[in-house]
Amino acid sequence: MHPALSVIAFTTFSGAGYGLAFVLALGHGNPGALSTKIAWFVALAMIAGGLLSSTLHLGNPQRAWRAVSQWRTSWLSREGVMAILTFVPLTLLAAMSIFGDSFSLALGYIGAIMCVITVYCTAMIYGSLRTIPQWCTPWTAACYLAFALTSGTLIYLAFFGREAGTSSNNAWVYLAVVFLVVTWLIKYFWTRNAQAVGYGDSTMESATGLGEIGKVRLLERPHAMGNYLTNEFAFRVARKHLSKMGGIVVLLGVALPILLLLLSLLVGNGFAGFLQVLATISLMAGLFVERWLFFAVAKHAVGLYYGGEEALVPAK
């Protein structure tokens, strides 16, 4: 699949925003503190910004409102409906903190649960597509939920948590490290599954409908040049580029954040906060690359009509 920058930004920033909102909705942070008030604003801004960026991928963004009308059958519509509904408790909680220095635990639990459901709906937009076997697995939803929680936790720790060097802050650091390890283990299993399934049960015979005649092989490409289907659904990246991008993900998304967080436990209060901010920035950069790979390695079954992976020209 062709990685669209708007969709990458949408899934990355909105996921992190919901993760941060989830942490705040569970009652973490003093509702009267300025940092908590800013945290609520940032969470809502990340969610709204991510959702708005997703409309840039639409052919007619002005018709985006129609997406919510098919909620009975479409995960995209369900995600849109849940995103709108989730704004209600989150906005109320933000208003209570910003204007009233107060918090409602019952409303917070409702908001936290709705954050989880919304991220799950976002994941199922991709996880429900049987034409892309790499995505059609429970590991996809697990990855989206884990990345949202981990990125939200690191953002809270780095920018809005309590004073660095305190026992409370140290507990958040250990928790963030555990979340990072578990999250990337889930991603590892997703990657192994993606490498194993390939095109799944689809074959060139089933794609062309010529299986009853015999074995199908490509004699000549249907088109001399690329078209919309080959550009969007049969996009392929050269193996050397995939290796480089994978290395960047491991460095920025795994190694550096864990190293910086652990180092923050050993240094003074002032520098510890700086290291935690760097860890969060590194993770978000790694997530951007990870999400790019998520789309780039996906193999849509329509590619089989054009001869499968071996017949496609790698993207430069």
Image: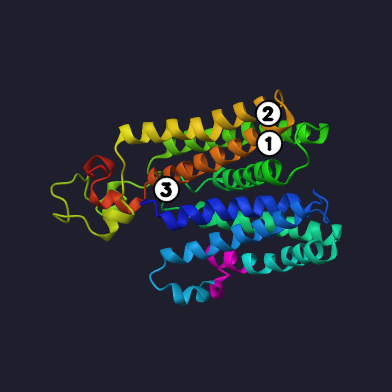
In magenta, the rendered stretch is: 68-81
Q: CA distance from mark 3 to mark 1?
A: 34 Å
The disc label shown at residue 295, or none: 3
- Inter-mark Cα distance, 2 to 1: 7 Å
Residue 47 screen position, x and y as percent: 60, 59
Category of crowding for the residue at label 1, using alpha-carbon neighbours closer than 10 angstroms: few (below 14), some (14–19), many (at least 20): many
Amino acid carrying label 3: it is Phe
**Quick one: label 3 or label 2, which is nearer the N terminus?**
2
Say which of marks 3 and 2 sits in front: 2
Residue at left offset 77%, top offset 54%: 34
* Secondary structure category for the residue under label 3: helix
- Residue at mark 2: 264
Say the numbered circle drawn on residue 247.
none
Above/below status of 52 relative to 160: below
Q: Residues within 10 Å of mark 2 (few under 14, many from 20)?
A: many
The residue wearing badge 1 is 273
Q: Are marks 3 and 2 in contact (CB under 8 Å)?
A: no
Q: Residue at x 54, y 63 (%)?
A: 51
